[in-house]
């Protein structure tokens, strides 16, 4: 209690080290680094938008980052409703589910901390139980309310944050790190599991960096399974959490404004972010080229959901890199192709059908590339993607577990770049 005002605190840990404190004062959030942590030679920032400093950060900067650790949109609403908490109450939601967040962040109440357990603890699920939990994930997101489970996953889709133990789905307990994410089919979107699976596989075939993905079957139903790119196995076999943050967190943009037409990042701003990190020596220049290829790929496959939260930075100390691409899906197959829009404009154009090759010249000027270079990248990806996609379709359709009619629909709706 300070001057009669009830101020609440949560401890923020990075790689299980206490780095600071999240405060809530009448719904106003602030974050302050721990003074002992700041004195460490090895201290690293929590976020590009929250650099190391003694002064506390105010509500705007704090809220954008920490709200970004929580699920988006409908998932967040259902989660809040189940817990009896306002969906706008970032502090209370993190208090309930912030034990295992994206990257290496964890959130605990005052006096608590991650247990530095030597042995991992899992609740291994038999297929029947796993299917039952996933079938009800829209009613009880993140298995909220279960003892010793405090897991949060950002994004708008229903999902379960898990590990795989001997091929079985396992729920991490306590401070045990997760290694995978599993998603059920999206209601009202036909073959969504295979759509996302195909697009990630296609990205890999086109030499873009992506995590490993699988179609996981439970009780006759397919689920989308993806390895977490923010986890890696150490030499001792232990799982190491890698710190990361999405572009909205980095740019201090609340998750509810992730789309450009809602005030979210533009491509120009995203590339400027990478330029700044490269100029400061935090990031290698190749990351900008990889991002360009990712932007072109998303356009070609018809992914209208490539917004600011679907791109991330991955940290190794103060070294930074663009995270592998994720959440890739052809959205045009679920919309009117003549009205289908992108999450971020290309040369002022929102609709896929309005974008021609010349618009990539304008984009090049906006983001600091020579137009001829961008055109060569566009031509290279455009010329190869259809043939690679057809070959991939044939390979996947040979296996009943990965076969789907949506592959033909995806290929038919890919964007052929007009001159």
Image: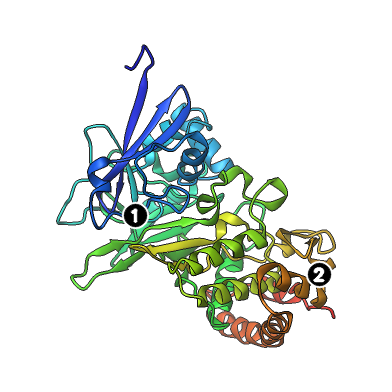
Q: Which residue is mark 1?
A: 104
Describe residue 194's horizontal placement relative to residue 347 as left or right.
Answer: left
In the image, what residue occupies the spot 54% across and 47% down? 252
Secondary structure type for disc 2: loop
The disc at residue 355 is 2
Residue 297's image quarter? Answer: bottom right
Residue that sits furthest to the left in the current view: 118
* Residue 324 picture location, percent across and down: 48, 69
Percent x, y for residue 263? 68, 46
Residue at 33% x, 55% y: name it. 44
| CA distance separating discs 1 and 2 | 39 Å
In the rendered image, residue 238, in percent from the top left (x then y), is placed at: 22, 65
Q: Residues within 10 Å of mark 2 (few under 14, many from 20)?
A: many
Which residue lies at the image location 44% right of the left edge and 72% below the top edge?
212
Residue 396 placement: quadrant: bottom right
The one of 38 and 99 positioned closer to us in this rendering: 38
Q: Could you say which disc has been placed on residue 281 in the image?
A: none
Q: Residue at x 49, y 57 (%)?
A: 183
Which of the pair 25/184 is nearer the observer?
Answer: 25
Q: Is residue 141 above or below residue 228?
A: above
Look at the picture and state if 299 lies above or below 340. below
Q: Quadrant of residue 306?
A: bottom right
């Amino acid at each position: 209690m300070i001057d009669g005002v009830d101020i609440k605190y949560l401890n923020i840990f990075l790689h299980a080290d206490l780095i600071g404190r999240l405060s809530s004062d009448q719904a106003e959030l602030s974050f302050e680094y721990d003074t002992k942590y700041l004195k460490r030679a090895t201290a690293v920032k929590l976020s590009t938008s929250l650099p190391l400093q003694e002064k506390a950060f105010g509500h705007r900067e704090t809220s954008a980052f920490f709200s970004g650790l929580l699920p988006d949109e409908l998932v967040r609403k259902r989660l809040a409703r189940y817990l009896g908490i306002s969906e706008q109450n970032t502090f209370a939601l993190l208090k309930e589910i912030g034990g295992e967040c994206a990257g290496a962040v964890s959130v605990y109440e005052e006096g608590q901390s991650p247990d530095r357990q030597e042995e991992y603890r899992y609740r291994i699920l038999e297929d029947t139980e796993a299917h039952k939990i996933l079938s009800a994930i829209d009613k009880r997101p993140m298995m909220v309310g279960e003892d010793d489970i405090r897991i949060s996953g950002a994004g708008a889709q229903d999902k379960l944050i898990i590990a795989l133990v001997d091929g079985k789905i396992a729920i991490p307990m306590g401070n045990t790190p997760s290694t995978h994410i599993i998603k059920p089919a999206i209601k009202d979107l036909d073959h969504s599991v295979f759509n996302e699976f195909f697009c990630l596989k296609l990205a890999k075939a086109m030499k873009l960096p992506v995590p490993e993905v699988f179609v996981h079957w439970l009780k006759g139903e397919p689920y989308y399974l993806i390895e977490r790119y923010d986890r890696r196995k150490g030499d001792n076999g232990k799982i190491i959490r890698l710190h990361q943050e999405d572009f909205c967190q980095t740019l201090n943009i609340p998750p509810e404004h992730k789309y450009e037409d809602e005030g979210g990042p533009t491509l120009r701003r995203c590339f400027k972010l990478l330029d700044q990190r490269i100029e400061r020596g935090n990031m290698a220049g190749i990351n900008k080229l990889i991002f360009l290829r990712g932007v072109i790929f998303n356009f070609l496959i018809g992914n209208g959901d490539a917004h600011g939260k679907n791109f991330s930075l991955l940290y190794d100390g103060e070294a930074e890199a663009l995270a592998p691409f994720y959440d890739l899906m052809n959205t045009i197959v679920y919309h009117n192709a003549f009205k289908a829009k992108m999450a971020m404009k290309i040369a002022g154009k929102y609709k896929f059908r309005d974008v021609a090759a010349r618009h990539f010249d304008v984009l090049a000027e906006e983001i600091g590339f020579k137009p001829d270079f961008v055109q060569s990248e566009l031509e290279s990806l455009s010329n190869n993607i259809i043939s690679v996609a057809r070959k991939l379709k044939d390979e996947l359709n040979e296996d009943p577990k990965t076969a789907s009619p949506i592959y033909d629909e995806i290929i038919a709706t890919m964007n052929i770049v007009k001159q």
